[in-house]
Image: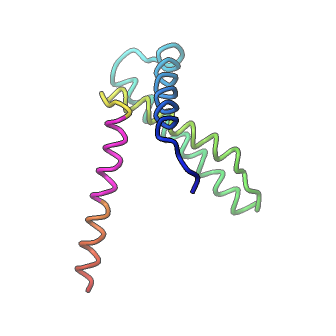
């Protein structure tokens, strides 16, 4: 795995957080809170579908579609960031929530494994 500079990562995350907010306010804002939430949810779902389609094509065609998949992944992240901000999260609270969910998943998996023994 590549070394990650935490300072650079933080700066990059804040930059895309602000850019996603700017883009939404200037190009895609809806009339209501709920309409914005629907927009973000459909954006995540749509981009995830496009990503899945490239996985299908990769399997079918034997072509990597690596750059296309990277673009779709970045679109998924942008919509996720906009949704998180809309829900009152900060970049740090979003990251902490991801960590919390992963820890809960690990605990659940360990409990399931112990139950099988």
Q: Position of residue 5 (x, y in %)?
A: 51, 42
- Displayed quadrant of residue 92: top left
Query: In the shown orientation, is residue 95 left or right of residue 45?
Result: left
99 drawn magenta:
yes
Q: Residue at x 37, y 41 (%)?
A: 95
The residue lying toward the viewer, choosing from 95 and 80, is: 95
Q: Residue at x 52, y 39 (%)?
A: 76
29 drawn magenta:
no
- Displayed quadrant of residue 85: top left
Q: Residue at x 51, y 13 (%)?
A: 26
Q: How many marks?
A: 0
The overriding secondary structure of the stretch rendered in magenta is: helix
Residue 39 lies, with reference to residue 94, above or below; the image says: above
Q: How is the image coloured?
A: rainbow
The residue range painted magenta reads: 92-104
Residue 82 lies, with reference to residue 31, above or below; the image says: below
Seen as rendered, the residue at the extreme bottom is 117
Q: Residue at x 60, y 44 (%)?
A: 50
The residue lying toward the viewer, choosing from 58 and 97, is: 97
For the C terminus, the image quarter is bottom left
Query: In the shown orientation, is residue 94 left or right of residue 39?
Result: left
Residue 90 lies, with reference to residue 65, above or below; the image says: above
Q: Position of residue 19 (x, y in %)?
A: 52, 22
Q: Position of residue 110 (x, y in %)?
A: 28, 72
For the N terminus, the image quarter is bottom right
The residue lying toward the viewer, choosing from 9 and 85, is: 9
């Amino acid at each position: 795995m590549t070394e990650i500079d935490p300072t650079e990562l933080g700066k990059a995350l804040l930059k895309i957080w602000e850019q996603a907010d700017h883009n939404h306010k200037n190009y895609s804002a809806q009339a209501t809170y709920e309409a914005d939430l629907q927009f973000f949810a459909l954006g995540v779902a749509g981009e995830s579908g496009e990503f899945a389609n490239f996985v299908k094509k990769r399997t079918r065609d034997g072509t990597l579609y690596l750059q296309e998949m990277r673009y779709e992944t970045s679109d998924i992240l942008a919509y996720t960031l906009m949704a998180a901000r809309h829900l009152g999260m900060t970049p740090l609270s979003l990251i902490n929530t991801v960590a919390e969910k992963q820890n809960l998943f690990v605990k659940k998996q360990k409990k399931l494994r112990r139950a099988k023994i």
